[in-house]
Image (tube, rainbow, N blue to C red):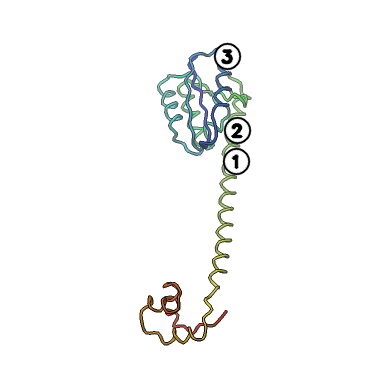
Amino acid sequence: MRVAVYFRVSTEDQTTEPQRLELLEYCNRRGWENVTEFRDVISGAKSSRDGLDVMMEGVRKHKFDAVVCVKMDRLGRSLTHLAQMLGEMNDHGVALIATSQGIDTSSSNPAAKLQLHVLMAVAEFEREIIQERTLAGLAAAKIRLAKIGRKLGRVARKWTDEEKNIIEAWDGTVAGLARELKCSVGTAHSTLKRCVSVENP
């Protein structure tokens, strides 16, 4: 039995070792010694991954009889991508085994196959929910920032009567006005642009 074991985590601060040990122990219990390991540290949403790509190339070249992972979401979260991989495995006579989910397509167990398809659908559903929550959070954050920006935008420089007279009579450069008023060039420019008659807020 030629077996490919695949384990994945999403970020570098996570470790694949627990998955690796579980899979190797599973293979040992079944007496499978010809085991090749494939590892990725990347989001499951990415359909192209270094370890996964090499493993699937081995599947296409009939190098394996089975692919073993801990859970389906280690392979991927997209129903389309998972279905594509399963189709390729089936076409090349390679079984898929998810050790913690009781999935084993090397058998003709219809219950296992039903569970497989249900889990694939659930994995994609969970991913869509996460995306919706993320987008909703970003939208809410943008609204909050916009409100803060509007509040900040209403804060105006409190000009003194003397400064107002300088502004109204100014015929020099913006930089010169900024130096005279001891303010930023941007403030001086916007003040002149409005042809000010500035009122204290």
Sequence order check: which comes first, mark 3 or mark 1? 3
Disc assigned to residue 29: none
- Front-lying residue, 135 or 170: 170
Seen in the image, is 35 located left or right of residue 171? right
Q: Position of residue 199 (x, y in %)?
A: 54, 83
- Mark closer to the observer (2, 1): 1
- Front-lying residue, 179 or 41: 179
Crowd class of label 1 (few under 14; some 14 to 19; many from 20; radius 10 Å): few
Sequence order check: which comes first, mark 2 or mark 1? 2
Q: Label 3's element?
A: loop
The structure residue drawn at horizontal position 51% and vertical position 20%, both measured from the top left corner, is 66
Q: Which residue is label 3 attached to? A: 30
- Front-lying residue, 123 or 39: 39
Q: Amino acid at mark 1?
A: Glu
Distance from the alpha carbon under mark 2 to that under mark 3: 24 Å
The answer to whether mark 2 and mark 1 are in CB contact below 8 A is no
Q: Amino acid at mark 2?
A: Leu
- Mark closer to the observer (3, 1): 3
Q: Which residue is label 1 attached to? A: 126
Distance from the alpha carbon under mark 2 to that under mark 1: 10 Å
Choose top left, top right, bottom left or bottom right for residue 143: bottom right
Q: Is 152 above or below relative to 122? A: below
Outermost residue to the top: 31
Q: Quadrant of the C terminus?
A: bottom right
Q: Which residue is label 2 attached to? A: 119
